[in-house]
Image (spheres, grey):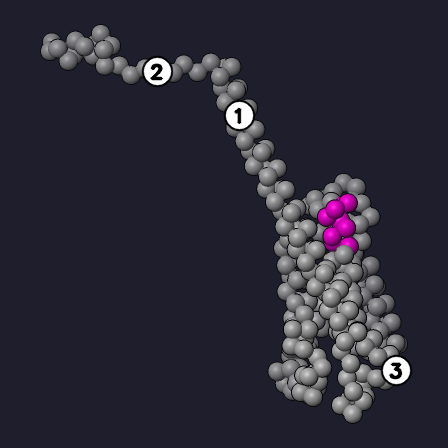
Amino acid sequence: MNQCQTHARCGLFSLPTRRFTPLSVSKSRAADTSVLETDSVNGREMREGLAIGFHAITFLQYAFAVFYDYTYTIVPHNVTRMHSAFGGKFKFLTFWDAILQTLFFLICLLNDLFGTNAVNPKKPPFTRKLKDYFHASLGFPIAMFVGVTFWALMLVDRELVLPKALDPYFPWWLNHLMHTMIVVTTVLEMIVAPRQYPKRSCGLGILASFMLTYLVW
């Protein structure tokens, strides 16, 4: 028997082993669970912060767009009489939609602060119910209709929706806020925050009532 074998049998080259007791295992599992819970809380707080920031910025941009369009977008009579006729800007579904988006993202912000963004809350607060109904029945369908229809007609003949004569009075950034960003923010809202959809009959009823009101107006 050589010297190395003798030393190996005597344990001179044996590595120290760690003994796991039930107490040490439970402590290890508790530490792992604590880390996972901390990561989950941090992730939830980050999502909530992003949602608040997104809703606040979007609400402010639409509120400013409505204010600017109503106050400063004045088209002379010799350019077009459409803006000075009965109803003014309220004849345009674009203006109605901008108001709807302003109200919707204000509701989203209030829900972020005082409601809940849980995926499936047992007792959703009023702000959450209002937000879900508003988005499904008015916010999403009106925004998509206005955005898609406007740009489709622009590709065919822009004189049908936004004549070149209006360019000096209706700035390009306002055009994109009211016809492009409405689609972008609506799609982002579906990604950022969960929702519970109302009954189909209820959502279609609210949408039909709104469209009938607009047509009568």
Q: Which residue is depicted at the point 76% across and 90% down? A: 79
Q: Which marked residue is nearer to the observer: mark 3 or mark 2? A: 3
Q: Main secondary structure of the magenta part?
A: helix
**Magenta residues, start to end:** 107-115
Q: Which residue is mark 1?
A: 31
Work out which residue is located at the far bottom of the displayed protein and give it.
78
Task: Name the residue rendered at 18%, 10% in the picture.
Answer: 7
Q: Which mark is residue 17?
A: 2
Q: Give the residue type that dot 3 points to.
A: Phe
Q: Quadrant of residue 68?
A: bottom right
Q: Residue at x 61, y 45 (%)?
A: 46
Q: Is residue 13 left or right of residue 191?
A: left
Crowd class of label 2 (few under 14; some 14 to 19; many from 20; radius 10 Å) = few
Mark 1: give few (<14), some (14-19) or many (20+) Cα within 10 Å.
few
Q: CA distance from mark 1 to mark 3?
A: 69 Å
Residue 170 in view here: yes
**Residue 143, how many percent across, how many down?**
71, 68
Quadrant of the snapshot with the C terminus: bottom right
Q: CA distance from mark 1 to mark 2?
A: 22 Å
Kindly indicate whether the residue at mark 2 contacts the one at mark 3 (C-beta within 8 angstroms): no
Check residue 117 in the rendering and tell me which mark sits there, or answer none: none
Q: Amino acid at mark 2?
A: Thr
Q: Nearer the viewer, residue 76 or 209?
A: 76
* Sequence-first disc among 1 and 3: 1
**Residue 93 showing in the rendered view:** no
